[in-house]
Amino acid sequence: MTSAPKHAGTTLAFDTSAGHCAAAVLRDGEIVIARGEDMTRGQAERLVPLLEEVLDEAGLAWSDIERIGVGVGPGNFTGIRISVATARGLALGLGVPAIGVTTFDAIASTTPGDTAVPAPRDQVYLSRVGQAPELVPKDQAGSATPPPPPPELAAAIARCAAAADPTECPAPAPFYLRPADAAPSRDLPPALLD
């Protein structure tokens, strides 16, 4: 016998793991609002104002949020860090749980089967059912389902987060399948004075 999914009363979800900034509000199992904006830069400056806008449009205040859902990737390193840091800070400040949701899980929640997330250099992050995700050339993705448009992705993240048991979820953390492209600085750090 399967139990009914757990639903937090009001879940605020967001994602900046790709070239977008997206947010959604789920209240009592229904998506109240979902918005997304295409952008390759500026997510750090745009995310919190977008969250305030969707809360305002939903007629809610920060104090109404009972749970946070956040997209943890795979995807853009900087974008993922922006969302995860924001989710963890909001969760701490509001005293609510934050649930990390991979893009794979968000896609699979609406379209079961293999899923694929675009990656740089004509590659995809591919998750085949029952196998560990991997980075492969795009032509190996076959019929894997890609992510939906950003507002739908944020809505799927909200539903996944609302259905999760927060006692079984660690704090959100970036989900990376490849190392960062950036090289460490060659400059020596400054000497610290006692």
Image (cartoon, helix red, strand yellow):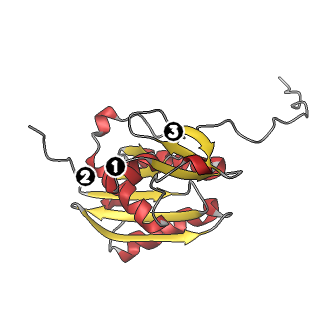
User: Percent from the top left, x then y, of residue 157?
Assistant: 39, 54
Q: Specify the quadrant of the image occupied by residue 1.
A: top left
Q: Note whether residue 165 is visible.
A: yes
Residue type (three-letter) at the residue carrying disc 1:
Ala
Give the residue number, with chain letter if any, for mark 2. 8
Give the residue number, with chain letter if any, for mark 1. 161
Residue situated furthest top in the rendering:
194
State the CA–CA distance, disc 2 to disc 3. Answer: 21 Å
Q: Note whether residue 82 is visible.
A: no
Q: For the point 35% across and 64% down, which residue is it?
A: 25
Q: Could you tell me if the residues under marks 1 and 2 are in contact, i.e. CB atoms within 8 Å?
A: yes
State the CA–CA distance, disc 1 to disc 2. Answer: 8 Å
User: Percent from the top left, x then y, of residue 126?
Assistant: 52, 44
Neighbourhood count class around disc 1 (C-alpha, 10 Å): few under 14, some 14–19, many 20 upward: many
Residue type (three-letter) at the residue carrying disc 3:
Ala
Disc number placed over residue 173 in the picture, else none: 3
Q: Nearer the viewer, residue 125 or 144?
A: 144
